[in-house]
Amino acid sequence: MNEALQPIEETDAVVVGAGPVGLFAVFELGMLRLRCRVVDALEAIGGQLVALYPTKPIYDIPGIPKLLAADLVARLAEQARPFAPGYHLNATVERLERRADGRWTVVLSGGQGIAAPVVVIAAGAGAFGPNRPPLAGIEAYEGKSVFYLVKRAEDFAGKRVVIAGGGDSAADWAVALAEVAAKVMVVHRRPKFRCAPESEARMRALAESGRIEMVIPYQLDALEGANGRLARVVVKTLDGEARALEADALLPFFGLAGDLGPIARWGIAMDGTAIKVDPATCATNLPGVFAIGDVAAYPGKLKLILTGFAEAALAAHAAFAVANPGRALHFEYSTTTGVPAI
Amino acid sequence: MNEALQPIEETDAVVVGAGPVGLFAVFELGMLRLRCRVVDALEAIGGQLVALYPTKPIYDIPGIPKLLAADLVARLAEQARPFAPGYHLNATVERLERRADGRWTVVLSGGQGIAAPVVVIAAGAGAFGPNRPPLAGIEAYEGKSVFYLVKRAEDFAGKRVVIAGGGDSAADWAVALAEVAAKVMVVHRRPKFRCAPESEARMRALAESGRIEMVIPYQLDALEGANGRLARVVVKTLDGEARALEADALLPFFGLAGDLGPIARWGIAMDGTAIKVDPATCATNLPGVFAIGDVAAYPGKLKLILTGFAEAALAAHAAFAVANPGRALHFEYSTTTGVPAI
């Protein structure tokens, strides 16, 4: 036992990752009366759906012909809510310790310990963080005038905003902020964008009407300002021609970098950067530890959200046996049981 | 070749079964630009959801905390609609014939032939029909005053209706018809019902207030009437005590009997009453023939609708390779592609 460990809380299952598949795992575990704690490295639930493409439509969720990624997260959170999961956000799992009683102690980055017989890893591409542009001194501006995530468009009301990148986040936020910002400039190194055609069309229409300035082909070169307060963003062409953009904020949208981080050191059998599981149960090589969603690998695996949902059901049924040794699971349909109190 | 075969139509995939999983298979195949024909033995799409429990809520469809079974069918049909599937209802597949060009000819009960490289069996519990009560002469009343399915409650407006059974269909229709019928009598052989507690509570409340008469513990014994027109339903206790219920209609709700029927004779490798598949692709032992949903068996299989959805995606991806030999499938997310025209 680690002396520094904070008092240990107990639950039935720790779900690592609060993306769509982790949230649905809370529901499936809850239907079998297993209580959960959910840990995520990001500051909000939703995983990639919220961090990468909240305003993008998804078409292949069964029974929902079209919905926005952020709305799917809201619906999954609502579906999980009856089971009152505890969320530990801005936290990573540092390590798993096997306890004498056969359960796991899940040790969080803050030192907190959670004891549970079951761990379900739904870590997607890993505990991911933003790709930072290589600009000298950028750390001093982060959280003050440089942001990798936008929480509310209104935070940029009346401001001059530089958006850098050529993907969905760049195009979507350019369109959204054009409504409220004093000025929106989009810096991209080439004319072609790799975002949804519909988003690009809307951005270009706003550029036509002067609501957005397209700064192309330029790349970020330097930041000017003081005390975390941005004054100018300097951009350059490949030929070295420079421009200084007067700006109050910079939003670099260069994607997220996946990093399984500590998970890769837990002693779990991997298949490249994914976790090997038994496709019949989603069990890993560690007893009571399951992996589902994009992080789980087995023959034929399709990295679709709807595949992760089915894996969540499989893992929950297998987890029931771990958490209730010797107790038979009476298989029932939700239409018969309703949603049980927990 | 069978001389009697009607002219053959061509498509990319024949989906056998228009339940929720078959409908979602149309969507998944359509996203990969494979056109479908859908065959079902029932007269309407929806499979068991519509035939057995249309007005029951389902709680475990990911992203939809609660919806009625019939509404799920409507949403799945809407999601499949852009791909304009052809529906062949009231039809069963009599046999599969391997063609010289490697495709299948799917021969329907009416003699019609459909040629396709891919067959996806989503037959659920099979081409099911109602369990008929063993009453002498019942055939003469069927479709006139004895019904195994209710299409519209209004069809029974002002009528005296006997409902027999103790499951969800019996309770739900007793509640629904109490609104419009002149009289509703529920015949069940024992006090205990095996339906959702909520449905039972509503039925019993209506019985309390005199809107429903509970005829318990009785079983159906005989029908009296003439020319298909019912006059009385005779019921008896186990002790032989009889009552004659004046009635215009009888609705026997004793469930559906699954019958894989001809499928079991197609040469497909079975596992009991289910079809053995490779869990990585949902492929059966016949080339180009896949099985998904409740009818498909593999280690760890959970008979959940959401599991069938994931299997539909797997089968569609594997079917693409069959329908487009030698062409690589560029894996893309729906949020990038949108819904393609087909």
Image (cartoon, coloured by chain):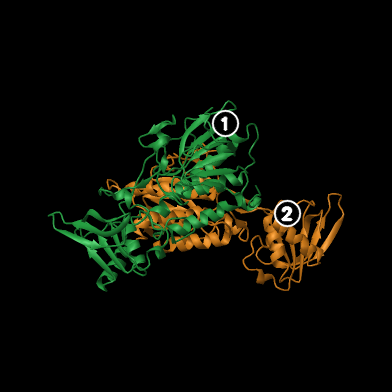
Chain colours: A green, B orange
Which quadrant of the figure contains the N terminus of chain A? top right
User: Going by the picture, which residue comes out furthest to the left?
Assistant: A239
Label 2 Cα neighbours within 10 Å, binned few <14 / some 14-19 / many ≥20: many
- Secondary structure of the residue carrying numbered label 2: loop
Query: Which chain hosts label 1?
Result: A
The vertical placement of B117 against A57, above or below, is above
Regarding mark 1 in the picture, which secondary structure is present there? loop
**Classed neighbour count for the residue bearing mark 1: other residues with Cα under 10 Å, few (<14), some (14–19), many (≥20):** many
Instruction: Using the rendered view, name the quadrant where residue A54 is placed.
Output: bottom left
Q: Residue at x 59, y 46 (%)?
A: A30
Please determine whether, in this image, residue A286 is positioned above or below residue A241.
above
Residue B248 can be seen in this image: yes
- Left/right placement of residue A207 relative to residue A301 reads left
Residue at the image point whose x is 42% and y is 47% from the top: B315
Task: Please give left or right for residue B84 compared with residue B204 in the image.
Answer: left
Q: Is residue B163 above or below residue A264?
A: below
Chain at numbered mark 2: B
Which amino acid lies under the numbered mark 1 shown in the image of this protein?
Answer: Arg
Residue A103, label in figure: 1
Report which quarter residue B204 is drawn in: bottom right
B322 horizontally vs A245: left or right: right
Q: Name the residue nearer the viewer: A228 or B93.
A: A228
Q: Which residue is mark 2?
A: B166
Q: Is residue B143 left or right of residue B291?
A: right
